[in-house]
Image: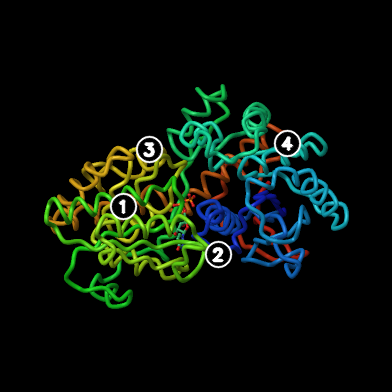
Amino acid sequence: MYEYVRRIAFISEHASPAASLGGEDAGGQNVYVDDLSRHLSRLGYAVDIFTRRTSPDQPVILDWAPGVRIVHLDAGPPCPVAKDQLWCWMPELRDAFLRFLAERHAWYDLIHAHFWMSGWVALELKRRLGIPVVQTFHALGQTKRRHQGEADTSPPARLAVEHAIVQQADRLIAQCPAERQELIHGYGASSKRITMLPAGVDTELFHPVDQAQARLRVGLDPSEPVVVYVGRILPRKDVRNVLRAVALLVRRLGQPARLLVVGGETPEPDPQATPELGALQRLAAELGIIDRVIFTGRRPRSELAWYYGAGDVAVTTPWYEPFGLTPLEAMACGRPVIGSAVGGISFTVQPGVTGFLVPPRDPEALAWRLGQLLVEPNLRARMGDAARLRVEREFTWERAARQTALVYEQVLAEAGTPPLTPGVDERPHRLSKVHGLHRRVVHGVG
Ligand code: UDP
């Protein structure tokens, strides 16, 4: 009997699985590191997620899930800091990681870095320790600069650092074809070093619910048409576009509809804490639809199936979207999605099958598609069923974790590390706890 252990260090400088989601700097990346690590641990990979300490009360090590720990590293003040202000603390994060290794006699087979600043830390560690690095960007500076121009508050170093990561990481994970293209054409990445591997969705948490029950639960009229937006409340998510489309629908096309807007920094909609929420409230008033829009504030993920389920259709029309988990969540809840034809949304939503794609910043196009779906219950039901099926087939975390594990094994093989088992092991195994880490014990190998 041989023991096989893989120990993976995730570095996710600003996005911890323990953060509350829906605010300015906590969204898809937090979910990704959380769900991916949990599912990797089921395949026998022990994952430590290294993130920046944001409160003096956080323990160094937080046991988060079987086989998954969160490690809080001191880098900068122990309080929340906007992610675009964090760059100067990355050398501290690197040094804190090195201290952790030395003090705890810890070691990792591979580093999986999330976002560009973590990628820089990972390259520093690779240079000093020789540990291979897999990088998921989650968002690319070049795309952001193109869309946000002067409003982009990313540190000036971002693009150069991203270029270095593209050249030096052992493997890049692109979450959708658009990101792959940007890496190749915008950053000169070699296509051989990119693996296209979409994120997943928790199909147990996000599942179809009875609409009448959902409406009751979230306090909505059972009979009125409902459009739902779930996500961070940021200018680039362009909820203003959704408001304009709903106004067109109501005023020009004479179709009554209610809009549910879920997200924000706080559980109550507070324009002080979430300035974009204030802008949305003012716009809704200007458009004469304030009585048709419900801003709920942030909601925990455990409740979101009720919000998606209360809707007839889910919408998300950002200017750009690196991947976009919320369309997948809505699809997993059996709802058709109208999304803008950008980034990951063009990949996850199948136009005419699971929903529709519309150009960004085009309220007319959105109003027209909303109008079409809201009057056709059969089409909505067909698309909702197709959406759920697509998620079950293509976008589960089990699948994403298996594919990620294959990437790790390829990278480790290239680095000369003995294989865990050929490919990703399918043989009977059990996990046992050794020194606080979950080890995989494979029987009868070799
Ligand atoms: N989210 C949440 N509560 C809210 C609003 C959003 O839990 O009130 C979650 C949402 O379910 C999704 C994530 O935040 O999992 C947003 O991820 P997405 O990839 O859609 O956007 P990103 O935040 O990466 O821009």
> Residue flagged by tag 2: what amino acid is it?
Ser
Earlier residue among tags 2 and 1 = 2
Relative to the observer, which residue lies in front, 122 or 86?
86
Tag 2, which secondary structure?
loop
Q: Residue at x 41, y 55 (%)?
A: 279
Quadrant (top left/top right/bottom left/bottom right) for the N terminus: bottom right
Side of 200 where 77 appears, left or right: right
For marks 3 and 1, give the CA distance: 13 Å
Q: Earlier in the sequence, mark 1 or mark 4?
A: 4
Q: Position of residue 354 (x, y in %)?
A: 26, 48
Label 3: few (<14), some (14–19) or many (≥20) C-alpha neighbours in 10 Å: many
Q: CA distance from mark 4 to mark 2?
A: 29 Å
The residue pinned by badge 2 equals 20
Front in this rendered view, residue 293 or 215: 293
Kind of residue sitting beneath label 1: Val
The image shows residue 233 at horizontal and vertical percentages of: 45, 55
Query: Which numbered disc flags the more N-terminal residue, 3 or 2?
Result: 2
- Label 3, on which residue? 342
SS of the residue at dot 1?
Answer: strand
Mark toward the start of the polypeptide (3 vs 4)? 4
Q: Is residue 169 visible?
A: no
Q: Amino acid at mark 3?
A: Val
Query: Which residue is labeled 4 in the image?
Result: 123
Q: Is the shortest distance between ligand 1 and the CB of mark 2 under 8 Å?
A: yes
